[in-house]
Image (cartoon, grey):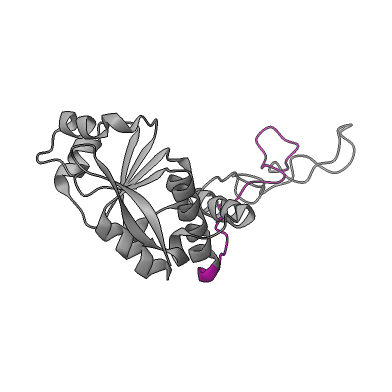
Amino acid sequence: MSVQIPALNNQGATASVEGADSIFGQLFNETLVHQLVVRYLAGARSGTKAQKNRSDVSGGGIKPWRQKGTGRARSGTLRSPIWRTGGVTFAARPRSFEQKLNKKMFRSGLRSILSELVRQDRLVVSNDIFPSAPKTKELIAKLKDLDAKRILIVADSIDTNLILASRNIPYVEVTLAENLSPVSLVAADKVIATTAAIKQLEERLA
């Protein structure tokens, strides 16, 4: 079985392209998609936050004053967290926020997202999206009929004209089928993919 994906040419005429039912005809698994998106967002965190604990701050090699007889509270080191120049009690340390996700779950989550995009008419196929020159004006003219606030263009190969023409358009993102991100898919109002990119996705997610 196959799923009909809307196709758009340069003159605005619509047709359809057949997509594999196993990729573009799956039920929407909200729990799995949420887990997939959270995993990608967590992996994007740098995790480089750091503070100094009592072993990192300088000083503290000598007891500030003797234990008894001064009238002040006993103290053993200047690096104690209760001192102004002391270390932080529960200091933040560099860490990784990455979450593990099985390959089968990853592929299943992408299939679920793509299938939902087809059902919502947010996925279209177009081979005429590539501009003839690195001109932003030409690309905007090709996208004006889509009426979308966020557009994701999925290409099968790197096209210099497309990349240069799109980099000054804040609502347009260009990616390759092999680097497709679930976060970008979910956030896009319209996803434009080439026929070759659709075939690559079918091979990758089969």
Report the magenta residues as a range: 80-104
Residue 64 image point, x, y percent: 74, 40
Q: Position of residue 138 (x, y in %)?
A: 16, 32
In the image, residue 94 lies in the stretch drawn in magenta: yes
Q: Position of residue 40 (x, y in %)?
A: 50, 53
Q: Residue at x 77, y 46 (%)?
A: 76
Q: Name the residue at 50% across, 69% down.
A: 103
Residue sitting nearer the eye, 85 or 176 = 176
Which residue: 54% across, 51% down? Answer: 37
Q: Would you identify the image quadrant in which residue 32 lies?
A: bottom right
Counting from the top left corner in percent of width and height, residue 57 is at 60, 45
Determine the main secondary structure of the stretch shown in magenta.
loop
Q: Is residue 142 visible?
A: yes
Nearer the observer, 190 or 52: 190
110 left or right of 162? right
Residue 108 within the magenta-colored segment of the rendering: no
Give the quarter of the figure containing the C terminus.
Answer: bottom left
The image quarter in which residue 51 lies? top right
Q: Quadrant of the N terminus?
A: bottom left
Depth check: give the residue in front, 150 or 63.
150
Closer to the camera, 143 or 50? 143
Residue 190 placement: quadrant: top left
206 sits to left or right of 173: right
Q: Would you say 24 lies left or right of 57 here?
A: left
